[in-house]
Image (cartoon, rainbow, N blue to C red):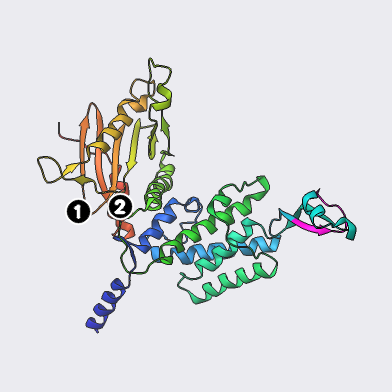
């Protein structure tokens, strides 16, 4: 019996899909951290972080419930631009088509007008999200519910293709669209969860050597999202993607066109304790081969985090005077956790093992922002 159990465990491990060296279930965990939805999940009812394999089922269940509620209250309508040959004028007359086809002789006129419809990009996006996530959920009855909801949307007229992310990015929500906004947030996460499994032709895809800018952005957003949820309740303020200003005393007329800007990945502020931690995430190996040694920290990254810290000293912000820096990389081969104090600023170099279990990832993320006392 012991051998059968061990064999089954080994088989389960072999069946794990990977993106590079990262298990797909950990990619799902990063996507959850990066999503706005992570801030709204009732984490007292389900420990999603410790069960990343259950994340698609959780999001699918959430999406089905949100869509059910929207259907009970009626989906939102929108206007779609249409062209048609009509017996009366509606909207604007298309004079070119009207003359070319001699429509007036037949009592017709070509018109362009806006038509109220339920077949909006917003509703189409949700329908396709239901179809996509149904392919990766574990529970068969949940997959059927997703497909049933998608079928219901089709029956009431939501039949368009999946709109692009650029189209969805231009969709603006009003004060009365809060339910729609939640529905779209869940649908976007459903698409993200399905993304790694759509192109898995083999067990292992090359990372980070391939162009995977979306994974780099995901890693950055996931780190910010995790700290936002984990630290805000303890008085921390999390600022993702903040631009820093150079303390310029004098400048020539053309310098603004060529002076590079400074944009941090994440800044953590705690006013009560006077702490600031500037985090820069890098989806590369933390060390490289040096001139006179086998391994060396990447000098460009050190200069970057040093500039973030020292450029803000003397601007009247007390948190900037002794701010700490953190270069946070995924581990590739081995773990690193080292720090140094340079001109009063503690700079830490740490890695996160994205191939580890979810509880270890969480522990490493929390440990990385504990600034140790360096030996002087």
Please provide the residue range marked out in magenta: 83-94
> For the residue labelled by badge 2, is the local secondary structure a helix, a strand or a loop?
helix
Vertical order, 95 against 140 (above or below): above
Tell me the tag on residue 280. Answer: none
Q: How many badges with numbers are in the image?
A: 2
Q: Residue at x 33, y 31 (%)?
A: 308
Asked whether 90 falls inside the magenta stretch, the response is: yes
Vertical order, 68 against 30 (above or below): below
Vertical order, 70 against 253 (above or below): below
| Disc on the earlier residue, 2 or 1 | 1
Tell me which corner region of the image, top left, top right, bottom left or bottom right, holds residue 98.
bottom right
Query: Residue 187: percent from the left, percent from the top?
Result: 54, 59
In this view of the protein, which residue sits in the foreground, 281 or 255?
255
Q: Rate crowding at label 2 as few (under 14), some (14 to 19) or many (20 or more) other CA atoms within 10 Å.
A: few
Asked whether 297 falls inside the magenta stretch, the response is: no
Cα distance in 3D space between marks 2 and 1: 17 Å
Q: Can residue 66 be seen from the camera position used here?
A: no
Which mark's residue is nearer the viewer, 2 or 1? 1
Q: Can residue 338 be seen from the camera position used here?
A: yes
């Amino acid at each position: 019996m012991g051998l059968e159990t061990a064999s089954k465990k080994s088989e389960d491990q072999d069946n794990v899909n990977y993106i590079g060296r990262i298990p797909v279930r950990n990619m799902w965990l990063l996507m959850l951290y990066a999503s706005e939805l992570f801030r709204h999940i009732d984490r007292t009812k389900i420990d999603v972080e410790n069960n990343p394999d259950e994340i698609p089922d959780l999001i699918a269940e959430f999406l089905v419930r949100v869509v059910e509620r929207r259907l009970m209250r009626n989906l939102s309508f929108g206007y779609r631009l249409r062209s048609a040959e009509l017996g009366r004028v509606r909207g604007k007359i298309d004079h070119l088509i009207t003359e070319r086809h001699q429509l007036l002789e037949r009592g017709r006129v070509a018109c362009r007008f806006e038509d109220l419809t339920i077949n909006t990009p917003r509703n189409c996006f949700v329908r396709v999200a239901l179809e996509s996530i149904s392919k990766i959920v574990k529970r068969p009855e949940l997959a059927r519910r997703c497909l049933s909801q998608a079928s219901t949307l089709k029956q009431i007229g939501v039949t368009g293709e999946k709109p692009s992310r650029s189209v969805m990015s231009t969709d603006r929500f009003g004060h009365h669209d809060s339910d729609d906004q939640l529905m779209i947030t869940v649908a976007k996460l459903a698409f993200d969860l399905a993304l790694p499994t759509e192109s898995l032709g083999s067990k292992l895809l090359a990372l980070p050597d391939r162009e995977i800018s979306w994974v780099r952005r995901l890693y950055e957003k996931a780190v910010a999202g995790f700290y936002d949820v984990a630290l805000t309740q303890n008085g921390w303020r999390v600022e993702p993607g903040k631009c820093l200003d150079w303390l310029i005393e004098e400048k020539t007329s053309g310098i603004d066109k060529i002076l590079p800007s400074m944009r941090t990945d994440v800044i953590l502020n705690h006013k009560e304790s006077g702490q600031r931690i500037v985090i820069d995430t890098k989806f590369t190996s933390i060390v490289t081969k040096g001139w006179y040694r086998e391994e060396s920290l990447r000098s460009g990254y050190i200069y970057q985090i040093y500039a973030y810290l020292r450029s803000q000293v003397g601007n009247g912000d007390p948190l900037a005077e002794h701010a700490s820096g953190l270069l946070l990389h995924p581990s590739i081969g081995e773990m690193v956790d080292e720090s140094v104090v340079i001109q009063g600023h503690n700079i830490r170099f740490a890695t996160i093992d994205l191939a580890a279990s979810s509880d270890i990832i969480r522990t490493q993320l929390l440990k990385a922002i504990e600034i140790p006392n360096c030996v002087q």
